[in-house]
Image (spheres, rainbow, N blue to C red):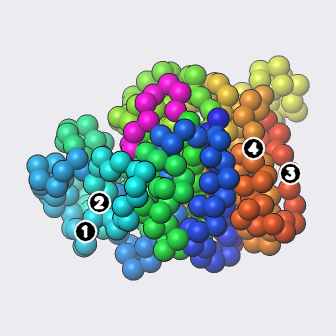
């Protein structure tokens, strides 16, 4: 039921959030007013070298003091502030959105060879599991996630999305089924450079969660989509798989299809299924994943959730509905429906 839409400008030209807000609002019937959100890349050019940590605080006393202490013990807070918002009559404010621009100090770890990304991941997991009343929901460089419990237009107006410019946008309208609607459960989900929006249900969530937590990640947001963001970080960043192979791990061909492939393809796909069997996702789903370098959209292996792709000049759109894309760009050069499990990839130009 959820509505998803994304766009990348391959030339990295900035787009404000007004048009994606109107596009997502066209899919209000795909939501229930219990969650909506937006992610944008390139929104913090003045702090591009710092990790933009977005948090929800229950209050600005005890949980914030503990977060401040942890961050200052691991690096430098260049700037912090409450994320500017505009109160909306039909949005109940249950959390305080806050942002830090933070740089970790690698010399604080023995040998000082630990990647910055691993320090940030550790801090995200530590804060989310040990500090009651604080939740990190966005942690990348020059990336911002803005989400809450509400309708797409309301959440966009609350965060004043039209005042931000990015060259990649993701947007999501949630229809929660297995978990209650709350601010942390709204999409997009983010870790470092990875942001994810998802329509459907990951029925293999238990196996996927056990697999990812064996690598030190901890799921705390009570929804199956969170595990997708962490799997992307593991396979994409730590294991170095390109987008095409990540998608084959998440939504691989069936064994009878692999058996009929040419020898080289059969060997490759068999190896991926055997190596990443616990990362395989079952259930009906359509997913879009973004990094600073591009976006990739894909569905489950029999396409039980819709996904439409379109192009206009340098821009690639991926959405649940063509009508939402056309609200952003009426004059499209190409529209197509990708096959089940087939990735649609848009990368920024070199």
Q: Which residues are magenta?
A: 176-184
Measure how far apart labels 2 and 3 are at the Cα level: 39 Å
Counting residues from the start of the chain, the first of labels 4 and 1 encountered is 1
Measure how far apart labels 2 and 4 are at the Cα level: 33 Å
Answer whether labels 2 and 3 touch (C-beta < 8 Å): no
Q: Name the spot of residue 57 as percent of width and height, x first.
A: 25, 50
Q: Which residue carries the number 1 mark?
A: 80
Q: Nearer the viewer, residue 228 or 37?
A: 37
The picture quadrant where one finds residue 213 is top left
Asked if residue 56 can be seen in this view, the reply is no
Identify the residue at image location x=62%, y=54%. Answer: 25
Q: Quadrant of the N terminus?
A: top right
Asked if residue 133 can be seen in this view, the reply is yes
Q: Name the spot of residue 290 as percent of width and height, x first.
A: 58, 55
Counting residues from the start of the chain, the first of labels 2 and 3 encountered is 2
Identify the residue at image location x=31%, y=57%. Answer: 97
Q: Name the spot of residue 188 as percent of width and height, x first.
A: 50, 49
Answer whether labels 1 and 2 touch (C-beta < 8 Å): yes
Q: Which residue carries the number 3 mark?
A: 336
| SS under mark 3 | strand
Counting residues from the start of the chain, the first of labels 1 and 2 encountered is 1
Identify the residue at image location x=82%, y=44%. Answer: 338
Label 3 packing within 10 angstroms: few (<14), some (14-19), many (20+): few
Quick check: 280 left or right of 340?
left
Main SS of residues in magenta: loop
Measure how far apart labels 3 and 1 are at the Cα level: 43 Å
Label annotation for residue 307: 4
Q: Which residue carries the number 2 mark?
A: 98
């Amino acid at each position: 039921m959820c509505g998803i839409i994304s766009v990348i400008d391959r030339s990295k030209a900035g787009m404000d959030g007004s048009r994606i807000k109107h596009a997502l609002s066209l899919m209000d019937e795909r939501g229930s007013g219990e969650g909506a959100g937006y992610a944008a890349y390139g929104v913090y050019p003045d702090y591009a070298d710092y990790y933009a940590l977005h948090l929800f605080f229950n209050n600005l006393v005890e949980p914030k003091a503990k977060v401040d202490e942890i961050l200052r013990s691991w690096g430098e807070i260049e700037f912090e502030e409450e994320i500017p918002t505009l109160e909306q009559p039909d949005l109940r404010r249950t959390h305080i959105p806050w942002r830090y621009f933070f740089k970790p100090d690698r010399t604080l770890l023995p040998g000082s060879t630990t990647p910055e990304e691993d320090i940030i991941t550790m801090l995200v997991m530590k804060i989310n599991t040990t500090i009651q009343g604080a939740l990190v929901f966005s942690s990348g460089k020059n990336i911002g996630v803005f989400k809450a419990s509400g309708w797409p237009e309301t959440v966009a107006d609350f965060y004043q999305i039209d005042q931000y410019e990015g060259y990649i946008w993701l947007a999501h309208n949630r229809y929660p089924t297995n978990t209650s609607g709350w601010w942390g459960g709204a999409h997009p989900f983010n870790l470092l450079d990875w942001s994810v929006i998802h329509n459907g249900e990951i029925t293999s969530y238990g196996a996927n969660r056990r697999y990812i937590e064996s690598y030190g990640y901890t799921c705390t947001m009570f929804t199956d989509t969170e595990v997708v963001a962490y799997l992307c970080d593991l396979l994409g960043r730590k294991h170095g798989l390109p987008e095409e192979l990540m998608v084959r791990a998440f939504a691989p061909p069936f064994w009878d299809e692999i058996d009929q492939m040419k020898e080289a393809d059969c060997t490759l796909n068999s190896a991926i299924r055997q190596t990443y069997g616990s990362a395989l996702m079952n259930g009906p789903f359509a997913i879009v994943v973004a990094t600073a370098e591009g976006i990739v959209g894909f569905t489950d292996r029999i396409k039980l959730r819709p996904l439409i792709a379109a192009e206009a000049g340098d821009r690639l759109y991926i959405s649940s509905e063509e009508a939402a894309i056309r609200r952003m760009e009426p004059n499209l050069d190409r529209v197509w429906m990708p096959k089940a499990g087939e990735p649609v990839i848009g990368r920024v130009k070199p």
